[in-house]
Amino acid sequence: MEFAELREAIEKTGVVDSHAHNIIPLDSSPAFINSLSEATGDALSFAPHSLSFKRNLRLIAQLYGTESSLDAVEQYRRLSGLQAISSKCFKAAGISAILIDDGLKLDNKHDIQWHKKFVPFVGRILRIESLAEDILNGEMPDGSTWTLDAFTETFLRSLKSYPFITFFANDIVGLKSIAAYRSGLEINPYVTREDAGIGLSEVLQCGKPIRITNKSLVDHIFTHGLEVAQQFDLPMQIHTGFGDKDLDLRLSNPLHLRTLLEDKRFSSCCIVLLHASYPYSKEASYLASVYPQVYLDFGLAIPRLSVHGMISSVKELLELAPLKKVMFSTDAYATPESYYLGVKHAREVVFSVLRDSCIDHDLSITEAIEASKDIFARNAIQLYKINLGRELLDLKASESPSCMSGTNITEHGVSLVRILWVDTSGQHRCRVVPKKRFDNVVKKNGVGLTFACMALSSAVDGPADETNLTGTGEIRLMPDPSTRREIPWKKQEEMVLADMHLRPGEAWEYCPREALRRVSKVLKDEFNLAMNAGFENEFYLLKKLERDGKEEWVPIDSKPYCSSSGFDAISTLFQEFVAALNTLNVTVEQLHAEAGKGQYEMALGHTACTYAADNLIFTRETVRAIANKHGLLATFVPKYDLDDIGSGSHVHLSLWQNGKNVFLASDESSQHGMSKVGEEFMAGVLDHLPSILAIIAPLPNSYDRIQPNTWSGAYQCWGKENREAPIRTACPPGIPNGFVSNFEIKSFDGCANPHLGLVAIIAAGIDGLRRHLCLPQPIEENPATLEGKLPRLPLSLSESLEALQKDSVLKELIGEKLFVAITGVRKAEIEYYSNNKEAYKQLIHRY
């Protein structure tokens, strides 16, 4: 075999150094010798006798044209000056881009801007522990001692502002954690607020300068950092494997990260294992092969190891890891020579490894060349979204990493991106921008939208009175990159859900998605609980007829409940629904024909409530769009036909703690098969249900559905497997008899904003937990037979709105401004549809 072509390709590739540190002035500390070894103190005296030190010193001497001695090289450096040797090293290395972690404490280090003199692109990697320590080294505004809440709020606010305030200067391209150095990689993503608070107190007691080593606090910081990384579509670099002597090598094995990697909350956040995880390179390779979000970086192992060690380490990484997931870096710091050495050795090592792969017939020469370009540049350019211009490398859009933006996007001529939001009235709306503009501008700066967007009713596309929102003022629709999806039924388009910001990085108080995060945080902080949700979607499929010259939409069939022939007639359509939802990462658990003419139901899997609300939006979009493609109209209107069965969006809810369902009773001593927290939470929801209805049943039409004897729940009660009760506890297959895993709210319908509906439910549950409310006895029979003995739920939107306006608890937890907007829009709905049920006909085109 001839390998000249492979060698030429490797030598000519402009490399992307994915992880490095600042250069320092020549007269600063640490000294030049430190850049050739990880040793410090007395151990440094032995460094010149190591294989890597001798080899690296010889290579630098050859570059500078001096004799191979430390004194000669240092003299050349002093005489030439930092500017000259930096230019020489970077030019010889052939570096196109550097990503700098400037959290490493170095004496008089040059800022990131200084490094731009030598390479086309310099990005910034933000070290989260350094940010946290900088905050704690400062003072609280009022001079008091830091509390966990104050620190966390400041940390998150600072972290979220960085991608925007640095947009035109030092672009943040990723975050980094050195948890391995502080407490190890066995990170607990469910660390309690109490434990983190104790950890903060212990750290503060040690005095300043702050060094965070308490495991609970480290885990708390890491988990919040990962949430932000996912929100802003930033990779998270993690130090793994060897390093300075203050690191416990046993705790830096990346296998300790398994609990974190299994956590579905963070499954769309790309995680980069640094330093080849040496000596755990095989373990790192395994993780990258089985977890789609795991990537590898072999900096530090090259050039610190011997030649044999460097080659064997990279070979171990490639034993299992996909070639699209392995990246190069130097881990250079302090001196330009460390950059040069990292690149030079990496080119030799990668050539040797890929050559051997060709000899072993694992790769062809062509495949090896492509692999070298991926490893040295393409993978990093794609993952960190570096804009170097396609003239640098022949990049193909289809080579985008699978977890980028938290999606499985494979670009093939995508031209448009839809930016979706759901307004206060529950209507889906979107702005559409060309993909190029989305990537270059909108992704970081959003699109402008009037304040009035959250004051629109289903009746009129204009701001409702009494919402305090008008056409004056503008927000930014900020795409949430973790929700970016290719549209299965429109292959040339993508869609993404949006948050609402006053300006990039500052959430608007009217944003439904932010409101759900906010109230979920209260539940987490006060009770260490998280709510899961799963929705059932009932909808009608209608076909268009022409009668007497007029267009009319009628049901596609009149088959009975759970009819096999009814489902068979439209099974092809439902196969499309399920396939599209699978592509969108939405789990479908069950399908069947419902009792109405042309009515069907599709039940979704349960997940964290924020994801469940997002999934419901994607599901409604999917059903309506694919039905439309087939000439049908799908509608989620609660009472499409006043003479037929209504449609709901029943929601199943459970409470989770540290990955375990704690709604379920722990033993058989529970009267109702629920835990104490489960009973108190559900009692709060039952107590506030009349108020909640104004949010989860948002139209006058909703109350034509909520009637006795229709399985929609017309009375304020609960029951065990009682489908006439508005709240029903459930014991699904797989749960021991007598135990309850979740409860269902049947009043939720398909016109509700899912995020706002879940906000109201969680707020009510929090009140139940705070007041330790008790449940009344369950109703075992049809509540309609107990007329006069049970309170009737509101008969109209007017009645439920009146209850909501009196509910100070929901007002506080929802937020006063958003609360006012909701009530204002509901008043507009009431006014428009009052004595005008004929106007209901327009709703099928809105919901």
Image (cartoon, rainbow, N blue to C red):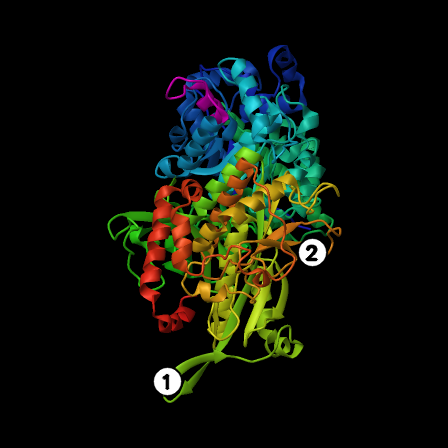
Q: Residues within 10 Å of mark 2 (few under 14, many from 20)?
A: few
Residue 770 in picture, x, y percent from top left? 53, 36
Q: Residue furthest top?
A: 42
Residue 789 in picture, x, y percent from top left? 55, 56
Image marks 2 and 1: residues in contact by CB distance under 8 Å: no
| 573 relative to 518, above or below | below
- For disc 1, the marked residue is 550
Please report the bounds of the magenta region as a residue range.
131-148
Residue 552 in which image quadrant: bottom left
Q: Amino acid under label 1?
A: Lys
Query: Helix, strand or loop at disc 1?
Result: strand
Tell me, yes or no, if residue 14 can be seen here: no
Which label was assigned to residue 732?
Answer: 2
Query: Marks 2 and 1: which is nearer the front?
Result: 2
Q: Residue furthest bottom?
A: 548
Q: Amino acid under label 2?
A: Pro
